[in-house]
Every structure is written in C-alpha cells, then in structure tokens.
Image (cartoon, rainbow, N blue to C red):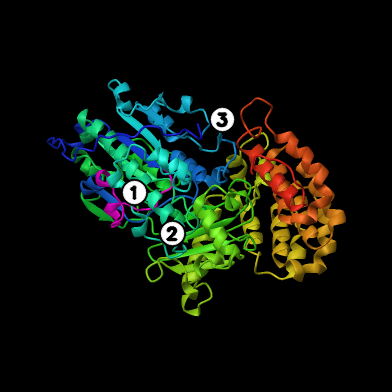
C-alpha cells in the first residue's frame, strides 16, 4: 500500500473543451461528484503558477477553467501526517499520526472522509498510496473500490450513485527526482523534446548552483511533465464520459518539492503546495470563486474533508477542525494556518509554525537539533541532491544559505514572506516585529491547546498513556493530558535557566519532566549543576524521561550510569520506545562503544528472516531502529556488511 509504483505513461492529453448544461436550481441537482488527484512531492512549479520552466499544458488548461489557490499549505512538510489530515479533516497532531510512520489506533467514532460519503450514498474509490498512519490501514473497508490495476476511470463502477475518487500519483516522489535510474524509467515514454535542459533549470536561492543540482532540478521538472500527461489522460476520460460537468476536481500535492530544504523543512518550501479546483458550471453556486481566477484565500489540508462534506450536503462532524471553503453552508475564512514537523523515520523533531498573509512564525522545541541531523535520511548515498550538498559541505564550498541547516536551529523564527520569500532573514529578535511575534506566539499557543496537540508529549509517552484506548481519546481527556502544563514546560526550552528547569524535574507530570530534561539538554555544558537531579530521573516512572535523562547525562560524561539505561530500553519490545533509545545511542557516536554487543544483538533481532527478500523485519520501526543501530556500530569503529551500504 505504501509503495505502489506507477508504471504507465499515458499519452492522451486533456481535451480543453467543456460540455455545457443549463443551470438548474440547487434543489433540483443531485449531489456533485468529487475527484481528488493528489501527487507527491511538488511545490507550485506549474505553468499556471507562473513557472516558465515547467511544461504542464493539461494542468494549465484545468486552471484556465478552474480556480488556482495561491496560498494552499500542507499540514506538514512530509507525507504521512499530511495524508492523515486530508482523509480525516483532523490535524494529525490531534490523532497522534504526526510522525513518519506509526500505526495509531483511531477511536470507533472517528471515520474517514470516504466512510462518511459511503454512509450518505456515495460510491468511493482509491488508487495509489494510503499511508495514513492508522492501525489498521484497511483501505478495503474505507473505500468501495480499490483500483490497483491502473483503472483510470473508476467512476464507471459506480452504478447510479454520486461518486468520490481519490488518486495518489507517485511519479514525482523525491526518489524519482533524485535517483537517475528512477527518472529514466519514469520518462522512458516521454517525447525527447519535452526533456528539460539542465542548463536552464532555475536553482532556488537556498541551493548551490552547480551542474549536479541543475540536473536534479531538471529531472524534477521532467517528472512533473509525466504527471501532467497522466492527469490529462484521467481528465480526458472524465470528459469523454460526460462526467466533467458533474464533478469538482481537486488537484494538489501532499507537500513541497522532494528536495533538500523543501520536503521535511518547516518553511514554505516544504508546505506551499499547488492546488487547483475545477468547479462545474451547474454547481457554481456552491463555490464563492470565479472560474478562471486566482484566489488568495488561505487553505490547509484539514479544510479539504469538511469542504467535500459541505459540497455533498452532509453534516460536518464536530471532530473535524478544518474550515470549509466551498459548499452549501457558508463559513468564515481563516486568517492563519498552523503546520507541524515531527519525527521522520528515526529522526526526532518537534516544531510548529503559523502562517498568515504576511509572516511565517516558527517555534522549535528541539532547537539544538539541526535540520540536517546526522543519519541515514540526510547522509544518503542514493539521493543525488543530498549527495551533492553533503559533498560541498565536506569541502567547505556549500553556499551559506544552505550551510546554516547543519547548525542548531533558532529557538524562534520569523520571516516576512513578502519582502523575504526565501526565508533567509530571521526577524525574531528584531524590535520592530515585537508585536507580530507576540500575536503569532499567542495564535500558536491557542491552537496547540484547542487541538490538544499530542506532539507536546514525546511519542512513547503518549503511546504508553493511551494503552487500552487511543491517543486521540487520551489526548482529549484533561485527566490524562494536561496540555497547558506540558506546553508551558515545552516553552521553557531555550529560554529558562538551570534552576527553573531543575525545579520542573520534580513535577508530578511526566510530560513536564520530559521537557525539563530537554531544556537542560539544550544548555548541556552550562547545566552541569543539574547532574544530580538528572541522575534521579534515571529511575523515573516514565521510560521516556529515563531515556532522555540518560542521553543528556551521557553527553555530560556520566556514561557509567547512563549507558546501561539506554541499553535496556534499546531491547524493549515496544518499538517506539526502542527507537527512542536507538536514536539516542546513535547521536552519542563513539561514546556508546560499551553498548556494541547489545547493538549487534538488536541488529540481528530486527533483520529479515532468510529468504524473505527483505532487508529488515518490516519497513517501519524495524527499519528505523536498524538504521540507528547500524550507524551506531559504525560510529563505534565496527566494520561489517549491512544493507545500508
């Protein structure tokens, strides 16, 4: 489900004509059809967004008769949490699905968009990835029809019902842009005249302008051309069947471009997505937009599901927190969006940002972690843009705009998106922007409390607390999750002194104690007086606090007492807890050498069975833990054959 590979290059183009129909009164119309075409890993690099290097005639034609949203933002700069938010209308941070990846239990009373539609008489279909972070994923129960065999007209299976179709198209994924062998396979059927010349490739301000980077960006645009061709084919079939005049079409990406400084980065580079909507003439009364226009209205992924329900005339459940931007009932427009960055594979992050019509404000709750954390994601030898950036970094020739990502992050960031669209000039400490900082801090603070953001609890902590229930239910129970107290503690990181943090270590709330440890970890060498208090946390009731205290103490040269704790939890049967320990050990590098025998034992534990054809026991936690274990062994001077080479 998570890695369905597109293997067909359509040659038909989208016919730009449109059947006409006399407008009926809304009471006489059946519910409209809805088609979502979701691609992977692209920013608004389309002709209709003014990108002259792009070759996207079919999407441009769709835009000419539709609405181009200029300010659409993903929920997160990475796929799984964005998909979770899209299909539920609930922020992933409220469900506990904000990481890449986890298998989170949902309460029975929370359904996905296709389930609500099915209950109300719609036929629903899906093609491509699910990847929602739910447990179980069960797409066969959530959708009426799964068309894995390249059925590009699933609406033909609907009978007389209105229908909802969800395509996820993967030819633009970062692995296709950054790996030449995948690019060649993707573009093998493309007219050679449509291949982009790397010499003309536009290189973003944050990237080094080298031959290698130009080639990667040219490949990225070639993949978008392939995408455009398939979108044209699907829309051509829709028109051929007379369905275009009855169907709202949403085209969008799951997040920004699959490039360094874009995907996984909590800036507009990772969050700003193309979003085009086709509005059928007979249903124009449901959309407050003129066709053939551009809209500056702010929209984000939590808005999509309630918008579809509103278009279909279905009551929007109270669990959905998005704001519909089309449909039967009118709603207020939003004036800001909040986006999140959490764990990706084995690399932990906790950052949140607020975007409005002028500024982007970010609070980094782990500011001592650089964006370019050491490890498999960024040290990859396969993804060519990362290879080039790391090469330039190692020889001291990387441009300063990207070099900063190897350093710790600022505690807070503020960028003027009008004067500084590339987000290079941090205004967080500029006195002239003090009021803007205050306002956006308050917006973020209020959103985290209102949505019960589970990211303020470390992943193993909310998994342990929600045993026998679900993270969502636990997170919405004030008796189990005092979000205000935990958030106050998280906001201490990077700002409070040692005495205040030591005092917080004595809190009755393990979430508060975790952030107190994190605050001391940020100060590290300036917090040696906290060693006795941290040592007491090695016996904390919360395994999460134990692991983080052990990691912090090991960095303070207290390895004799710290490493045994990390070694113990590395072997824990709860994979999300073992991963927390594994990543901590990896970041200690050679300091963890006494744990080498345990590391070998754990590496064997998560290896795939002989003859399975896989490298690891599974592609999620077994893979993530193994990445950290393998890197840890290498940092400790061990030489051995392993599948990451």
Give the SS element for disc 1. strand
Q: Nearer the viewer, residue 575 or 22?
A: 575
Q: Which residue is mark 3?
A: 136
Packing grade of label 2 (10 A; few <14, some 14-19, many >=20) is few
Per the picture, the main secondary structure of the magenta-coloured stretch is: loop
Residue 43 located within the stretch drawn in magenta: yes
Packing grade of label 3 (10 A; few <14, some 14-19, many >=20) is few
The range drawn in magenta is 40-59
Q: Nearer the viewer, residue 201 or 257?
A: 201
Which corner quadrant of the image does residue 618 belong to? top right
Outermost residue to the right: 560
Position of residue 381 in the picture relative to residue 315 (left or right): right
Going from the N terminus, do you reach mark 2 or mark 3 first? 3
Going from the N terminus, do you reach mark 1 or mark 3 first? 3
Going from the N terminus, do you reach mark 2 or mark 1 first? 2
Q: Which residue is mark 2?
A: 211
Q: Nearer the viewer, residue 505 or 591?
A: 591
**What quarter of the picture does the C terminus occupy?**
top right
Residue 304 position within the rendered picture, expressed as x and y whole percent measured from the top left: 38, 44
250 to 530, vertically: above or below: above
Residue 283 position within the rendered picture, expressed as x and y whole percent measured from the top left: 22, 39
Position of residue 12 in the picture relative to residue 90 (left or right): left
Alpha carbon separation for disc pair 2 and 1: 31 Å
Alpha carbon separation for disc pair 1 and 3: 29 Å
478 to 104, vertically: above or below: below
Residue at 34%, 32% (x, y): give it: 164
Residue at 65%, 34% (x, y): give it: 616
In the drawing, what numbered circle is on residue 275? 1
Alpha carbon separation for disc pair 2 and 3: 45 Å
Give the SS element for disc 3. loop
Residue 584 position within the rendered picture, expressed as x and y whole percent measured from the top left: 72, 52
Residue 242 visible to the viewer: no
């Amino acid at each position: 489900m998570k890695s369905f590979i597109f293997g067909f290059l359509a040659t038909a183009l989208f016919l730009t004509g449109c059947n006409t129909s006399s407008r009926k009164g809304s009471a006489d119309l059946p519910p409209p059809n809805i088609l979502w075409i979701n691609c992977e890993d692209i920013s608004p690099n389309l002709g209709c967004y003014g990108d002259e290097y792009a070759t996207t005639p079919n999407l441009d034609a769709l835009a000419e008769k539709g609405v181009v949203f200029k300010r659409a933002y993903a929920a997160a700069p990475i796929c799984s949490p964005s998909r979770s938010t899209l299909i539920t209308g609930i922020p992933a941070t409220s469900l506990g699905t904000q990481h890449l990846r986890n298998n989170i239990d949902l309460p029975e009373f929370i359904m996905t968009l296709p389930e609500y539609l099915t209950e109300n008489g719609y036929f629903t279909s899906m093609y491509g990835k699910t990847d929602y972070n739910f447990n179980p994923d069960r797409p066969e129960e959530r959708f009426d029809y799964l068309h894995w065999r390249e059925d590009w007209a699933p609406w033909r299976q609907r009978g007389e019902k209105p229908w909802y179709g969800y395509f996820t198209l993967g030819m633009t994924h970062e692995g296709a842009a950054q790996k030449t062998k995948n690019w060649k396979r993707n573009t093998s059927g493309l007219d050679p005249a449509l291949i982009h010349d790397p010499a003309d490739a536009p290189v973003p301000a944050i990237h080094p302008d080298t031959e290698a980077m130009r080639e990667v960006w040219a490949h990225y645009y070639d993949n978008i051309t392939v995408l455009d061709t398939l979108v044209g084919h699907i829309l051509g079939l829709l028109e051929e069947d007379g369905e275009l005049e009855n169907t709202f079409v949403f085209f969008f990406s799951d997040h920004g471009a699959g490039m360094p400084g874009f995907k996984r980065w909590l800036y507009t580079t990772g969050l700003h997505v193309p979003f085009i909507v086709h509005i059928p003439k007979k249903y124009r009364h449901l959309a407050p937009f003129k066709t053939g226009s551009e809209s500056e209205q702010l929209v984000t992924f939590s808005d999509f599901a309630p918008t579809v329900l509103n278009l279909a005339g279905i009551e929007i459940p109270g669990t959905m927190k998005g704001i519909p931007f089309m449909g039967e009932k009118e709603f207020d427009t939003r004036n800001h969006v909040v986006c999140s960055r959490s764990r990706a594979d084995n690399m932990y992050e906790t950052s949140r940002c607020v975007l409005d019509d002028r500024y982007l404000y970010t609070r980094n709750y782990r500011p001592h972690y650089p964006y370019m954390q050491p490890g498999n994601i960024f040290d990859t030898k396969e993804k060519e843009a990362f290879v080039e950036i790391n090469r330039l970094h190692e020889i001291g020739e990387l441009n300063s705009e990207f070099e900063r990502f190897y350093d710790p992050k600022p505690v807070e960031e503020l960028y003027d998106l009008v004067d500084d669209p590339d987000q290079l000039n941090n205004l967080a400490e500029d006195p002239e922007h003090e009021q803007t900082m205050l306002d956006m801090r308050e917006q973020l603070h209020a959103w985290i409390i209102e949505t019960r953001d589970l990211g303020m609890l470390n992943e193993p902590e909310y998994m342990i607390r929600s045993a026998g229930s679900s993270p969502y239910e636990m997170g919405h129970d004030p008796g189990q999750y005092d979000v205000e107290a935990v958030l106050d503690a998280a906001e201490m990181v990077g700002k409070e002194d040692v005495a205040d943090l030591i005092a917080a270590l004595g809190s009755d709330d393990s979430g508060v104690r975790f952030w107190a440890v994190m605050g001391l970890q940020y100060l590290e060498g300036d917090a040696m007086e906290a060693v006795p208090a941290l040592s007491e946390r090695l016996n904390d009731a919360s395994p999460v606090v134990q692991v983080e205290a052990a990691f912090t103490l090991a960095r303070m040269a207290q390895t004799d007492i710290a490493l045994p704790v990390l070694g113990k939890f590395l072997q824990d049967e709860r994979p999300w807890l073992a991963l927390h320990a594994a990543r901590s050990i990896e970041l200690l590098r050679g300091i963890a050498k006494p744990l080498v025998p345990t590391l070998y034992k754990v590496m064997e534990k998560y290896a795939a069975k002989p003859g399975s054809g896989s490298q690891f026991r599974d592609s999620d936690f077994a893979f993530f833990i193994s990445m950290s274990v393998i890197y840890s062994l290498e940092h400790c001077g061990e030489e051995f054959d392993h599948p990451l080479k």
